[in-house]
Image (cartoon, rainbow, N blue to C red):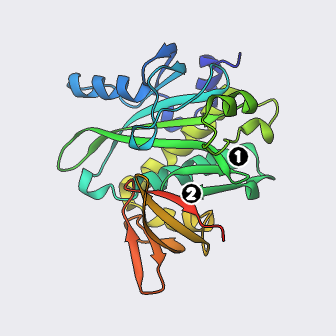
Amino acid sequence: MRRIDREQLRMLLSSSLQKLTIEVVDETGSTNADLIARLKTVSQPRLPIVRAAYRQTAGRGRHGRPWVASPGNALLFSFACEILRPPAELAGLSLAVSTAVMAGLHALMPTDMHRLALKWPNDILLDGAKLAGILIEIARSSHTSSMAVIGIGLNLDGEAALAAQLSAQANPPAVLARVLPQVAMTNVLAHLLNALAAMLERFSEHGLAPFLPAWNDSHAYAGKKVFVLEGNREILRGIAMGVDAYGRLLIDTGNGMQTLASGDVSLRAHIL
């Protein structure tokens, strides 16, 4: 089973993460929930913290959907950090995080980046199938900063077994082993953490703006017909455009431009 080598991980981290607290557990309910609970109860937590688990019994994605993964075949971790912006100024953070994940993967697979894309608001696709997802939660905040927990789940291997665990209606996922057959969990985690740290420093200073070009360049549905679901109900269809300065997806309905706020809907490609 793939495992995380803490000593090697420490050696691979950038200078800004040398004081990172590294926690690796065999099993937990949810690494996000673990860190959220700690940040809410500890008055002065030592940040940043990364908490990884080989198995999560209550892992979840957007809208509380369960995250299906088997030990060793997925990288499941949460990164607790302080962002020097209040919650009202965190618009588009999930999009910025997704560009950081892309940057981390780019360092691992520079010749295959054309196979990766971003699905609004924060899914990473490989060959059009979901490779990774992001869940961001705010634990505490003040008028100048926010303590956030960024949860990331990334499929490494076990594609057939993973597909078998999903319902027949679910789209089959992708795994990184398609591109990197001998992918090492420690190496992937190090690259993602380094990219996250660099992104957060820039986001704290400038917000979403510096990340918009990268996100729009990787937008999987740019210029494509899509329909938008809220629950199981279609509420909108049109041509997916880019995202605005607040991270909202722009949909050209033919009767004007509509904006979608992050996290409110599910997005599907419309195939005629």
In terms of secondary structure, where does tag 2 sit? strand
Mark 1 vs 2, N-terminal side: 1
Tell me the distance, in whole angstroms, between the alpha carbons under discs 1 and 2. Answer: 20 Å
The residue most toward the top is 26
Give the camera-side residue of 11 and 131. 131
Instruction: Give the residue type at disc 1.
Output: Ala
In terms of secondary structure, where does tag 1 sit? helix
Give the camera-side residue of 169 and 225. 169
Give the camera-side residue of 41 and 124. 124
Instruction: Give the residue type at disc 2.
Output: Lys
Q: Mark 1–mark 2 contact, CB under 8 Å?
A: no
The residue most toward the left is 143
Q: Is residue 105 left or right of residue 76?
A: right
Image quarter where the C terminus lies is bottom right
Image quarter where the N terminus lies is top right
- Where residue 114 sits, quadrant-wise, is bottom right
Using the image, determine if residue 153 lies above or below residue 27.
below
Label of residue 119 in the image: 2
Q: Residues within 10 Å of mark 1 (few under 14, many from 20)?
A: some
Please tell me which residue is depicted at 46% across the width and 28% down the height of the picture: 59
Please tell me which residue is depicted at 49% across the width and 43% down the height of the picture: 134
Residue indicated by mark 1? 107
Is residue 221 visible in the rendered image? The answer is yes
Using the image, determine if residue 200 lies above or below residue 256.
above
Please tell me which residue is depicted at 43% across the width and 49% down the height of the picture: 201
